Amino acid sequence: MTKTKIKALLLAAAFCAATPAAAEEITASVWFPETHPLTRDGYMALKKSVEEASDGNLTMQVYTGTSLLPPVAHLSGLTDGIVQMTYHAGTYTPSDLPEDNTLAALAIGLPDSMTAALAVADFYINDPAMQEMFKRLGIVFLGSYASPQYVMMCADEVTTLDQVKGKKLRMPSPVHAAWAESVGAVPVNVPSSEMFTGLEKGQLDCAINAANDLKSRSLWDVAKYTTLLEVGPYFAGWEYAMAQDAWAGLSPESRQILIDAMPGNIVAMTAAYLGTVDEALAEAADHGVTVSEPAADLAGSLADFVDAKVDAMAVETGEKLGAKDPEALIARFKETYAKWEDLLADIPADDLDAIAEVFRTEVYDKVDVTAYGQ
């Protein structure tokens, strides 16, 4: 080889080494405001981490609130190519997500939000039925979420079975509505954005949602009584999913950066979400809110309902929506949830690094970005 050829090859190699990878951008939408944990500690934190990890070669354009898409359109916006990544509340589109809604029906009986968030990600990434659901839709699931436990925020005191009778309760799902009916209450199906108005105008007696809404939605102005009857977290849908063609269009390096960011992001986001509840409850008395535990009869009615009814209702949900073998699906999810209860049993709840490391080892380190979602 001549000196001229060697020099040319060295110059070419130096040029390639100095040339940055082609820049890639993900357009994303989450319909919560920037102050909400799923946005602030979820999407905005993810944007920062992937941009830093990629030295700016992978960027995210995040649309928040309803600036681009209304809440119900965060699945169609993804499949229609309006955006490349979204958050989506699965119960808004049950016929499109039969398997997801089957499992969401179990939420009323799940005791821990962090366990739920990690179990959902594990199950949705690894269970064949869940992956088939995403494949049908042409999307790629990347990350989960779970809200804090939903509780009762009421205009009047409601702590006993006698007091709940006849009360109009904003309920988040058909299963929750069935429990309300079983205790003589009246379930009302309105979106969370209408809770304040409903309480203010007397259309609702209680809003059932996470207690951070006392502060974030100013419910403490219209709901002066909070009863800590835990009716489960909300986890339907996903925190992060991408359109399949958008995921496939990313370089393997960018896909790996996203996957590597997921464990720490989801754990920190879930902890921050739980922290907003603690903050709101700590400030509640300053706003004239009385926070109470439920009476034994009210708590007992919920426990009895979960034991006797919820599994059958989840199976019925799956059958109505066309999920294949919902009973087996539920059994597999329960095994995964129990697995995460065991994995987290000896880790302090505030040791987020240790939780994220187990999450990474058990789930995300096993994702092959060259094959997953293809």
Image (cartoon, rainbow, N blue to C red):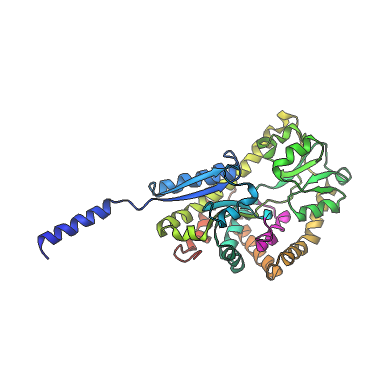
Q: Residue at x 36, y 53 (%)?
A: 22
Query: Does residue 287 lie above or below 142 as drawn?
Result: above
Q: Which quadrant of the view contains residue 219? A: top right
Nearer to me, 289 or 124: 124
Judged left or right of residue 156, residue 65 is left
Q: Which quadrant of the view contains residue 138? A: bottom right
Query: Does residue 88 lie above or below 228 as drawn?
Result: below
Query: Does residue 318 lie above or below 239 as drawn?
Result: below
Nearer to me, 48 or 119: 48
Q: Is residue 300 visible?
A: no
Q: Which x, y percent locates residue 271?
A: 59, 45
- Start and end of the magenta stretch? 93-112
Q: Which x, y percent locates residue 133?
A: 61, 65
Q: Residue at x 59, y 67 (%)?
A: 132
Q: Residue at x 46, y 46 (%)?
A: 49
Judged left or right of residue 212, residue 205 is right
Q: Based on the picture, tell me whether residue 124 belongs to the magenta stretch.
A: no
Q: Which x, y percent locates residue 356?
A: 52, 52
The total of numbered circles placed on residues is 0
Q: Which x, y percent locates residue 167?
A: 85, 43
Q: Based on the picture, tell me whether residue 95 belongs to the magenta stretch.
A: yes
Q: Which quadrant of the view contains residue 344? A: bottom right
Nearer to me, 349 or 116: 116
Q: Quadrant of the N terminus?
A: bottom left
Q: Is residue 61 visible?
A: yes
